[in-house]
Image (tube, grey):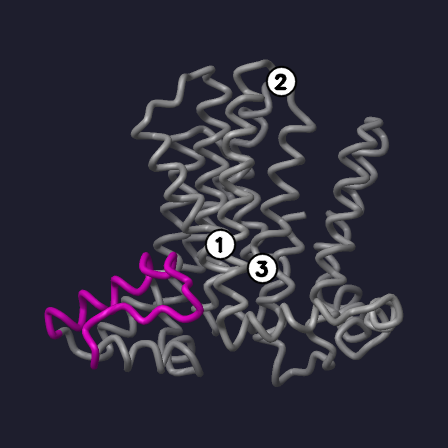
């Protein structure tokens, strides 16, 4: 039985679950839209009649265009809020259908739903963190890339421009996507057969990814939010690095991984065991090192304890590790 056939049922289960989340985004639109940032962004969009991008996160246009169009055609406020709340899962649904049905890349679609599931509870009601949109663009890019490689297609210039544009939207939308992006990019090339053509395309896009990461870092240094996080990382020494693994963030997250997010832990350990059993030691090492790097970056940049009051925020920071 082929891998694609094996992924059929898990894909449609994932699709069904995503549809439930979409319905929930409509039912709970007040809880999602009248909480912190979405209320401010909606207010700004309605009053300025233009996009409201924070920290140069331009990929957010895909969700903000719903309240923007709603305000331009003078829809009532509840309708605009419903549109904005649903827009996130409409985009995610588009990505999952495009990956699974059009591009036949069910594995990426399922991974995206894992991301939207495993470390998610309170953050469901804080939808507009651009990292989720960044991951959506990333999954779409990787699906397009794998589709062309598996079909042994010569990528036409128009498709190149489309893929580079999607790649740019992914990386520019949030700096936090960089670690899982690099992990998935290296993982797929290490785990697949290579030829001169695929290596040439891989090299081209690797250079493009590196360039966009540099642009994202430069833009982040010039901002009040990301810049503070980067400055904190720059000032880390060996003592601060190891101390971070015992701070409030690390201790509280370790406890939550056992009590609240244990399904993710089980699947992560099963994945490590599978790689070890199949003697894929390079992929095993890459996975462990990437997970440790992501963990370290979060506990270094956020030292405070996770509490019921801030769980919505820190879940959004930790969700990226599920991609690893």
Q: Residue at x 44, y 48 (%)?
A: 137
Q: Position of residue 279 (x, y in %)?
A: 84, 27
| 67 drawn magenta | yes
**Residue 186 drawn above or below residue 148:** below
Of tags 2 and 1, which is closer to the observer?
1
Q: Which residue is mark 1?
A: 215
Q: Which residue is mark 2?
A: 194
**Residue 126 drawn above or below residue 277:** below
| 251 drawn magenta | no
Q: Which element carries disc 1, helix, strand or loop?
A: helix
Horizontal relation, residue 7 to residue 293: left or right: left
Q: Quadrant of residue 301?
A: bottom right
Disc nearer the start of the sequence (3/2)? 3
Query: How many residues crowd around disc 3 within 10 Å: few (fewer than 14), some, or many (20 or more)?
Result: many
Q: Which residue is mark 3?
A: 176
User: What is the C-alpha distance between the residues marked 3 and 2?
Assistant: 29 Å
Which range of residues does the magenta coloring cover?
47-74
Q: Are marks 3 and 2 in contact (CB under 8 Å)?
A: no
Q: Residue at x 71, y 63 (%)?
A: 297
Disc nearer the start of the sequence (3/1)? 3
Q: Residue at x 66, y 43 (%)?
A: 183
């Amino acid at each position: 039985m082929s891998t694609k056939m094996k992924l059929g049922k898990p894909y449609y289960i994932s699709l069904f679950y995503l549809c439930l989340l979409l319905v929930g985004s409509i039912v709970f639109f007040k809880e999602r839209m009248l909480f912190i940032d979405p209320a401010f962004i909606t207010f700004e969009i309605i009053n300025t009649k233009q996009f409201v991008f924070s920290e140069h996160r331009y990929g957010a246009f895909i969700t903000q265009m719903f309240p923007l169009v709603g305000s331009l055609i003078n829809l009532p406020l509840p309708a605009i809020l419903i549109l904005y709340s649903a827009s996130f899962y409409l985009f995610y649904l588009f990505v999952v259908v495009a990956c699974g049905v059009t591009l036949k890349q069910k594995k990426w679609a399922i991974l995206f739903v894992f991301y939207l599931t495993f470390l998610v509870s309170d953050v469901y009601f804080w939808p507009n963190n651009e990292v989720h949109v960044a991951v959506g663009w990333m999954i779409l890019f990787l699906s397009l890339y794998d589709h062309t490689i598996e079909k042994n297609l010569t990528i036409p210039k128009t498709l190149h421009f489309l893929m580079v544009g999607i790649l740019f939207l992914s990386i520019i939308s949030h700096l936090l996507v960089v670690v899982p992006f690099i992990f998935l990019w290296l993982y797929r090339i290490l785990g697949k057969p290579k030829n001169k053509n695929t290596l040439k395309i891989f090299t081209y896009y690797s250079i493009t990814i590196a360039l966009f990461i540099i642009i994202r870092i430069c833009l982040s240094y010039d901002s009040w939010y990301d810049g503070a996080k980067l400055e904190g990382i720059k000032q880390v020494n060996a003592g601060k690095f190891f101390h971070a693994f015992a701070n409030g963030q690390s201790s509280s997250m370790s406890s939550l991984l056992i009590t609240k997010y244990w399904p993710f832990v089980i699947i992560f350990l099963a994945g490590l065991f599978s790689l070890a059993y199949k003697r894929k030691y390079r992929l095993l090492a890459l996975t462990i090192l990437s997970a440790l790097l992501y963990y370290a970056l979060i506990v270094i940049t956020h030292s405070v304890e996770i509490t019921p009051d801030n769980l919505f925020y820190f879940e959004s920071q930790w969700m990226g590790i599920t991609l690893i």
